[in-house]
Image (cartoon, rainbow, N blue to C red):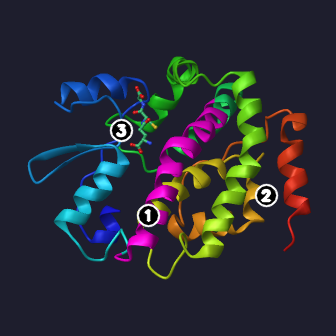
Amino acid sequence: MLEYKGIAYKRTDLFPVMSKGIVRALGFPGKTVPALKIDGRKVQGSRPIARELERLAPTPALFPEDPELRAAVEEAERFGDEELQHPIRQISWWSIRHDNSSLRSYSEGAKLGIPIGLAVRTAAPVVALAARTNEASDENVRRDLAALPGFLDKIDAWIEAGVLDGEQLNAADFQVAPSVRLAMTLQDLRPAIDARPAGKHARRVIPDYPGDAPAILPPAWLQQLRDTTTATPS
Ligand SMILES: N[C@@H](CCC(=O)N[C@@H](CS)C(=O)NCC(=O)O)C(=O)O
């Protein structure tokens, strides 16, 4: 969103889990990232950040003027934040915890403040903790995978309706695409998502996204996703 608005910025990446204490120590009121200092203000959470950027730099707009379209964009944005992100985060942490050979690929371009090799070599406890705090259990990940086709149907429908993937990108595009793009780093999920408008959309919004995790999820957990993809008319 910063790049879209043409606002120069400095990026810092924080280790998962430890990020909570660091953002607090930096004086942010909450414990989550993304967290942004801009114009002397501290703004936290991707939805408040979208609104603050819109206030500071109204064009290009992240929210459409038409009230009906704006309401639809805000609903898609809310869905991306509240419904889509967490299941995909759980599936991702589950996969990385079961095979962390992909960690280096996820760290490409990260600004961690320590050498990537060192970060990767010492990452196992952080990964285990992140999987635990995000409740990336077998049971939850099975449920997440069962819900995924429905989430993708919703995104495809918003694309069809012009709420997402319009000529000009909007706040919902920037909210939904990162989670879809994260899911596409998993070889288990990538072909099924690539076959859909949601996959094409995610690649448009974020052409380069680091991370490539080998297939590791039990095939039985993926059956529903594969069946729905085959059944989708092209
Ligand atoms: N959807 C929220 C995500 C915020 C969030 O959950 N961030 C995670 C990292 S992906 C975090 O900081 N977790 C630490 C915690 O919840 O304690 C947003 O877009 O701001």
Q: Residue at x 77, y 31 (%)?
A: 142
What distance separates the C-alpha of mark 1 from that of mark 3? 25 Å
Which region is colored magenta? 65-93
- Characterize the magenta stretch by its predominant secondary structure: helix
Number of numbered discs overlaid on the protein picture: 3
Q: Which of the two marks, 1 or 3, is nearer to us in this view?
A: 1
Mark carried by residue 71 = 1
The answer to whether the residue bearing label 3 lies less than 8 angstroms from the nearest atom of ligand 1 is yes
The amino acid sitting under disc 1 is Ala
**Residue 198 image offset from top left, x and y in percent:** 66, 64
In the image, is residue 83 part of the stretch drawn in magenta? yes
The amino acid sitting under disc 3 is Val
**Residue 217 image offset from top left, x and y in percent:** 80, 35
Mark carried by residue 191 = 2
Disc 1 secondary structure class = helix
In this rendering, position of residue 131 left or right of residue 12: right
Residue that carries the numbered disc 3 in the rendered image: 33
Disc 3 secondary structure class = loop
What distance separates the C-alpha of mark 2 from that of mark 1? 32 Å
**Residue 98 image offset from top left, x and y in percent:** 71, 26
| Residue closest to the eye, 120 or 130 | 130
The amino acid sitting under disc 2 is Pro
Quarter placement of the N terminus: bottom left
Mark carried by residue 10 = none
Whether tag 3 and tag 2 are in contact, CB under 8 A, the answer is no
Q: Earlier in the sequence, mark 3 or mark 2?
A: 3
Tell me if residue 210 comes above or below residue 95 in the rendering. below
**Residue 155 image offset from top left, x and y in percent:** 64, 61
What distance separates the C-alpha of mark 3 from that of mark 2? 29 Å
| Residue closest to the eye, 16 or 120 | 16
